[in-house]
Image (cartoon, rainbow, N blue to C red):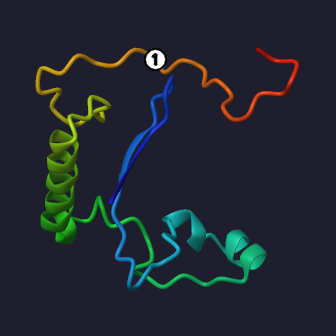
Amino acid sequence: MGQVFMSGSAVRETQLFNLKDNPDELLAEHHDPEVVALTGVQPGKEQVNLAPDPRHAAKLAEMQGLLLAEMRRLNDPWRLWNQPADALTPPPDAPAQKKTGKKKKNEK
């Protein structure tokens, strides 16, 4: 199960794949004849995002519950759009990461 969120955009998508049958996590877009012609891969009928399929609702709910439980165990404040905040203070936007490692002789 994956949750796709693109900061600064309206993209919020939940994805669920049966990795035994769809290890490459193929989507409906991969079934397009032009994509098949370019890739040479002909996906099977079930090689799609299973999250919107009501037949997989129980598995999706189970996976979402496991994800939230692990985030709570770790006190992870970076919640997704469809998860409770649990009164945690949302983190500020992440600052730019500083380079780490050995400094050159002329650096302080």
Q: Residue at x 46, y 17 (%)?
A: 93
Measured as percent of width and height from the top left, residue 35 is found at: 69, 70
Measured as percent of width and height from the top left, residue 6 is found at: 49, 34
Report whether 72 appears left or right of 76.
left
Q: Nearer the viewer, residue 65 or 9?
A: 65
Q: Nearer the viewer, residue 79 or 32?
A: 79
Within the image, what quadrant is residue 38 found in? bottom right
Rendered view: 74 above or below 57: above
Measured as percent of width and height from the top left, residue 27 is found at: 50, 66
Badge 1: residue crowd in 10 Å (few <14, some 14–19, many ≥20): few
The residue under label 1 is 93
Q: Of all residues shown, which one is farthest toward the front? A: 105
Quadrant (top left/top right/bottom left/bottom right) for the C terminus: top right
Q: The residue tagged with tag 1: helix, strand or loop? A: loop
Report whether 107 appears left or right of 64.
right
Q: How many marks?
A: 1
Rendered view: 92 above or below 30: above
Q: Residue at x 11, y 27 (%)?
A: 86
Quadrant (top left/top right/bottom left/bottom right) for the N terminus: bottom left
Amino acid at the residue labelled 1: Asp
Rendered view: 1 above or below 45: above
Report whether 42 appears left or right of 88.
right
Q: Residue at x 77, y 28 (%)?
A: 103
Measured as percent of width and height from the top left, residue 105 is found at: 86, 24
Rendered view: 65 above or below 75: below
